Image (cartoon, rainbow, N blue to C red):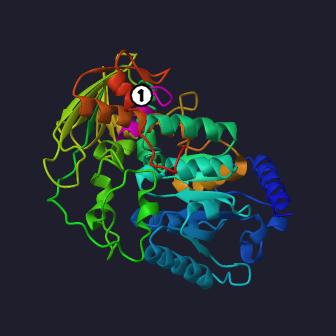
Amino acid sequence: MRKKAKVNRRQFLQRAGGAAAVSIGFPYVVSSSAVGTAGTIAPSNRITLGCIGLGRMGVGDMRSFMSLKEVQVVAVCDVDSKRLNHAKEIVEKYYGQQGSKESYKGCAAYGDFREVIARDDIDAVSIVTPDHWHALPALAAARAGKDIFLQKPMTLTVQEGRLLSNTVRRNKCVLLVGTQHRSNRYNRHACELVRNGRIGKLHTVRIGLGGDPACTPQPNMPIPKNLDYQMWLGPAPEAPYTEKRVHPQTDYSRPGWLRVNDYCCGQITGNGSHYLDMAHWGMDTERTGPVAIEGETTYPTEGIWDVHGAFHLEYTYANGIRMIVGKNCKSGVRFEGSEGWVTALGRKEAEPKSLLSSVIGADEIHLIKSDNHKQNFIDCVKSRREPIAPVEVGHRSASVCILGYIAMKLGHKLKWDPKQETFLNDEPANRMLSRPLRSPWRL
């Protein structure tokens, strides 16, 4: 009975989305018969959400979703019971203060993401886990027909990204990647200026990004009782527990796993997922990739934090555009053309300065509009339209970062076929497009 009810609900949302001509970035409109008291959305027509991963970003994203009247968080999940219980308290306190006690049935807490996905009364999931835990829950959710908000980078490997993109599209799910800088008016305008030729012929994009620090050797430590460490490791290699490998036990400050190669690729995918994604948006290369990559970096000589330090990367695209990323560029994304330049994701600068107030005409290229990333996701869950950062675009944005990571690791120039997603005549590089998963986990 639950499954049937869910299908009917989704059909209702699709019909309502079409009838109301839902525009991305604008509130969803429903008839008076579908709303509750005081103009709130009736419980039967809300999007029920499960939140998987409740660290510093996970709790922040959960709060953002709770602030949307169309959403109701009904489940939370984390392998750290301290964080899990804290998130559950936040959710139940919030809905209690909103006067939703009669319609709200409570928030269930789980230590295993599969229990959240198994609930057929949950419409969508928010996945905000360490990078090595992005693909598996997202694939499980897509195979179950659930819609997905997935924090960046979309996946840890190119292989995972291709599989996830294919699975999401085959199952007709909505997946929004957490590259929220797309939902910024100035960034959108800057990319529209580039797309419409206002800086002339684009030839170079420069992106400033730094590296990560090293740490001293860390002692093995007892595993906290509140942490399911084997589940936290999941598909990653076995490793002794120490707090700087995982996350702080006393607060929500920056976790150590962001600087460990087994769980992420470092700043090139961390902030790079935002910056290189923005570059692709302006370059109109969102669904392709470079044809050549070369780079250099330094790596720590001790300690468990082993991702890259300061680095320099150069990408070349089939249309001749060069993208230069790293220590020698100013922060932000700077698009340089034959007649001027403009920046995104940083200070609002351009040459000539008149570009900043330039209006995009009705007959020119207009990019998807969104002023609220989470709202865009919910709007698209209801309308079934493609969100502002869809799965294939997210895959290509993550891939270009991963290609840079591989180039730095190998230390020689790579040639890439963006259509086949393979390196040309370079088997060592091709082996790095995937990573082995620790048993019993598999894609």
> Residue 139, relative to residue 429: is it above or below?
below
Estimate the x, y position of residue 409 in percent, counting from the top left: 25, 34
Q: Closest to the observer: 432 or 70?
A: 432
Residue 222 lies in quadrant: bottom left
Residue 432 lies in quadrant: top left
Label 1 is placed on what type of residue?
Met
Estimate the x, y position of residue 118 in percent, counting from the top left: 68, 60
Please give the name of the residue rendered at 42% of the width and 50% of the height, measured from the top-left corner.
Answer: 132
Relative to residue 114, is residue 80 drawn left or right?
Answer: left
Please give the name of the residue rendered at 56% of the width and 40% of the height, measured from the top-left corner.
Answer: 164
Instruction: Say whether residue 370 is visible.
Output: no
Q: Is residue 360 magenta?
A: no
Estimate the x, y position of residue 241 in percent, counting from the top left: 31, 64
Badge 1: few (under 14), some or many (20 or more) residues near its Cα, within 10 Å?
many
Instruction: Say whether residue 261 is visible.
Output: yes
Q: Main secondary structure of the magenta part?
A: helix
Residue segment shown in magenta: 275-289
Please give the name of the residue rendered at 70% of the width and 49% of the height, measured from the top-left corner.
Answer: 145
Which secondary structure, mark 1?
helix
Q: Closest to the observer: 120 or 227?
A: 227
Please identify the quadrant where the N terminus is shown.
bottom right
Estimate the x, y position of residue 202 in percent, counting from the top left: 35, 22
> Residue 136, relative to residue 232: is it above or below?
above
Residue 331 lies in quadrant: top left
Please give the name of the residue rendered at 70% of the width and 63% of the height, measured from the top-left corner.
Answer: 119
Counting every numbered tag in the picture gives 1
Q: Closest to the observer: 442 or 413?
A: 442
The residue wearing badge 1 is 283
